[in-house]
Each structure stands twice: as structure tokens, then as C-alpha cells.
Image (cartoon, helix red, strand yellow):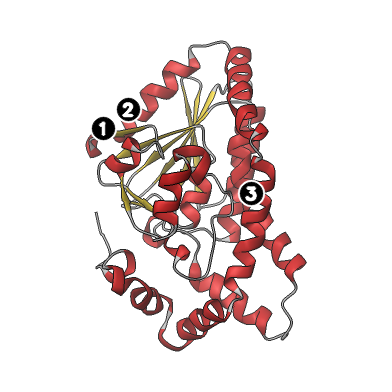
Amino acid sequence: MSDCIRTETEAGVRSIVLARPEQYNTITPELRDALSAAIDDADADPAVRVMLLRADGPAFCAGYGLDWSTEYQAGAEAEQVWDSAKDFRMMSGFVDVYLKFWYAAKPTIAAVQGWCIAGGTDMVLCTDVIVAAENAVFGYPPSRVWGTPTTAMWVYRMGFEKAKRYLLTGDEIPARTAAEIGLIGECVPDDRLTEHAFGLAERMAKLPGNQLEMLKLLCNQTVENMGFASSRTLGTFLDGVARHTGEGQAFVARAGQVGFRQAVRERDEPFGDYGSRPRREN
């Protein structure tokens, strides 16, 4: 297993832990590949009944490792012509891994603390149940420039009105608000997050495996019948379009001049949130 992911198994629960705390567990190709292997292994292991996605450090996942992402786009733009099919395949390589939580036969729970934003939400919203600490903050700041939600789970989770409210502003969603509007399942005190999420996983693990699989399939099929497959395909494609608009290219150019964190700070400063505030350390 890669250093950026570790796994633990106890009482039928396989914990899959994002282990890049110094980098706020940002997503890289290496993390993607290790996560994919960890999900496959857990789903195939007969001793595992439930998967629990957790993260080390102060943040669950602050999105993509954007120094890597902006460098990727800058290199692609050196070719002058944007290859939309190539871009779609690249992004689908990440999206397909997140969807493994959705399509796994076994239930998947996420325990979220601190930042869970941008690509982090694309990942976590594919799990079956989300439990968050009170200090957790969700959101999709690339709504403001340079992206769209690739897994397109927002409307399905919290409804049309609330999804538009938060995607059309990119505003932060504190954990308690996220629970109230249905984006996540539960919000618990910070010091009870792991205990509570693991306890929930243990309760699920008491059911027969075939019952868990059938009930998950039944719930998921309702969303599939609403057009989820076409929504996520469009979301993934439009993410590439958004990264290659004039504004998206200007954002990448600015990041090349002043660094990604400063470019994000400038993006978010008019809203007074995300990158415009000091980084959290605990």
C-alpha cells in the first residue's frame, strides 16, 4: 500500500485512511491509485462488511493537489489545442475511483473533519453515509472559476434549491448546516467523530452481508433512475470546459505568476472565505 493511504481492519470494518496530513490530504495521481486499490481489496475481502473512509490531520481533503493540477493544464496548453476527449479521460480516471465507493457491494461511511472542499467533495459524496465533526466545512470553491462538480452528487443529496444556492455562490457549508440541509447524514462533536463513525459502521456490520448489499442497491438504483449516470458524465466533461474558458486559463496563468495559494486567495477574497483566510493547523 502506498504511503498516502493506509488501511486497518477491526470487527468487520475496513478503515481506509487518507494519509497526507501535511498536504491536507490533497488528491494526486498516486493517492488516486492507492485509494482505488484499497477499495477493491476491501470489497473483495469476505471478512470486511463495511468500509470507513477517514483522514489523518486537521483536514479531510482540501481538493486536488493543485500545484500538480495547474502544472498539468499549463503543459497541456503548451500544445495550443485543447483535446477535450483526452481531458475527459484524464478526469474520468479520478471520478471512476470515487464512484467505487458508490458501486461497492459493501456500505461505505465517511468520517470528515476540517476542510472537505472541491475535489474532496467529489470523493466523499460518493460514499453512502457521511458523518462530520462540528469543525468540518464543505464547499465547492471552483464554482467561482476553474471547475464543476465531476460526480454531480449535489442535487441528489440535498435537492435542487439548496444545490443551486451553494453551487451558484461557491459558499462554504459548515458541518451543522450541511447536516440540516441533507448534504451529509450527521454532525457530531469533534472529539467523538471517529468513535461515532466507527460505531455506526459496527452497527451496519451486524447485518448479513447480502442484506447490506441488497439494501444499498435498492437505494442507489433510485438515484440511477433519476439520471445519475448522465449527470456525472456531463459534470466531468463540463469540468474540463470550465478549466479551459478564458477565465479558467487566466486563473492558471495567475497561479503560474504568484503561486496557486495566492491565486486562490485572490479568487476567494471578495467572498471572505476559503483561501482568503489563514490555513487551519488543528
Q: How far apart are labels 3 and 2 at the CA level?
A: 31 Å
Residue 159, image x and y in percent? 46, 40
Residue 237, image x and y in percent? 67, 60
Residue 5, image x and y in percent? 51, 47
Callout 3–callout 2 Cβ contact below 8 Å: no
What residue is rendered at 68% in x and 55% in y?
A: 92
Callout 2–callout 1 Cβ contact below 8 Å: yes
Secondary structure beneath disc 1? helix
Q: Residues within 10 Å of mark 3 (few under 14, many from 20)?
A: some
- Res. 138 mark: none
Earlier residue among tags 3 and 1: 1
Rendered position, 119 above or below 145: above
Residue, disc 2: 196
Q: Is residue 33 visible?
A: no
Q: Quadrant of residue 70?
A: bottom right
What residue is rendered at 49% in x and 65% in y?
A: 65
Q: Is residue 32 visible?
A: yes
Q: How many marks?
A: 3
Residue, disc 3: 232
Q: In screen coordinates, is 262 left or right of 212?
A: left
- Res. 192 mark: 1
